Image: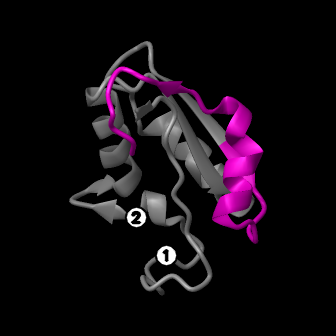
Amino acid sequence: MQAEQPSKQRSCKFDSLHPATDGYPLALLPIGNKPLLTYQLDYLERNSISKIIVVIEKRFMAKLDKYFNSYYRPLNQTTEIELVAISDEEESGNVLKMIKDRITVRRKESHLF
């Protein structure tokens, strides 16, 4: 199975990349002059994922909006990227419950991200 809408990347208080991520989401940490999230989104698009959900803590939403409005350009014009803001204290399992109705699975391959 291949997840049609993968994605969750969180920065947490106990992040081992402190102080590089102080006030900055891990997803936007520059690696090779590109934010980490860019590599993930490009990979998903190159592998025919057309609907992507990006979950981010509310406190970083403005930074992620800026990233999508001024930096990131999808490789494919039909790619849909949905941003979902969560409270800073939300656990992974709760986040998946919150977005479960938005997740679809395409059953062409037995591949799950």
The tag on residue 67 is: none
**Residue in the image at 63% along x and 54% along y:** 56
The kind of residue on which mark 2 rests is Leu
Count of numbered circles on the image = 2
- Left or right: where does residue 78 sit relative to residue 103? left
The tag on residue 21 is: 1
**Residue in the image at 50% along x and 46% along y:** 7
Q: Residues within 10 Å of mark 2 (few under 14, many from 20)?
A: some
Tag 1 and tag 2, C-beta contact below 8 Å: yes
Residue hosting label 2: 29
Q: Which residues are magenta?
A: 84-113
User: Which residue is at the front of the view, 72 or 54?
Assistant: 54
Work out whether 87 lies above or below 113.
below
Work out whether 36 lies above or below 80.
below
Rendered location of residue 35, percent (x, y): 36, 54
* Disc on the earlier residue, 1 or 2: 1
The image quarter in which residue 42 lies:
top left
Instruction: Say which quadrant the N terminus sits in.
Output: top left
Q: Residues within 10 Å of mark 1 (few under 14, many from 20)?
A: some
Question: Dot 1: what SS?
Answer: loop
